[in-house]
Amino acid sequence: MVDVMLVLLIIFMVTAPMIQRGIDVNLPVARRAATVEGERLFVTVPTSYHTDGLLYIGQERVTAGALAGRLKERLQAVTDKQVYLQGDGAVQLQDLMKVIDQLKDAGVSQVAIVAKAPGDI
């Protein structure tokens, strides 16, 4: 009788972890990025954006109100509507969120946030 109980205990101990199911999570995959074909479109948010509302598309200085219109012009001929967003370290998160909303309104499908590696200066 004890032998049967021990065998059942071992069977339940082995099968219990197999029965449990966790939450499906789509984790990012670490890999080397492929080279980007074509021209990259950078939108830069300087520290002074909060006070004067000016930012840059590439090297072109643009007001926050004209950002969506200028981006629509630049992205008309491009099939991959991806923009690289970079900003100073002192830019407030709320300001970045406003810019991202304007980018989405302009028809940008993907917004990539540019960051420096810990060793880069």
Image (cartoon, helix red, strand yellow):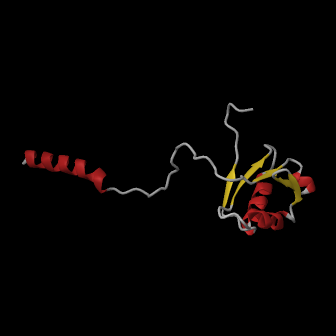
Q: Quadrant of residue 65?
A: bottom right
**What residue appears at the point 83 percent right and 63 percent down from the top-left corner?**
67
User: In screen coordinates, is 51 left or right of 35?
Assistant: right
Residue 64 versus residue 1 in the image, above or below = below
**Residue beneath the point at 19% across and 46% down:** 10
Image spot of residue 3 (x, y percent): 8, 45
Q: Nearer the viewer, residue 79 or 5?
A: 79
Give residue 78's position: percent from left, percent from top: 69, 63
Residue 105, percent from left and from top: 74, 69
Q: Residue at x 85, y 48 (%)?
A: 46
Q: How many marks?
A: 0
Query: Taking 92 as reference, is 113 left or right?
Result: left
Indicate the quadrant containing the C terminus: top left, top right, bottom left or bottom right: top right
Give the camera-side residue of 79 and 100.
79
Q: Residue furthest right?
A: 52
Residue furthest left in the image: 1
From the viewer's perspective, tell me whether residue 20 is left or right of residue 28. left
Q: x, y percentage for residue 17?
A: 30, 51
Q: Nearer the viewer, residue 102 or 91?
A: 102
Q: What residue do we see at 27% from left, 52% from top?
A: 16
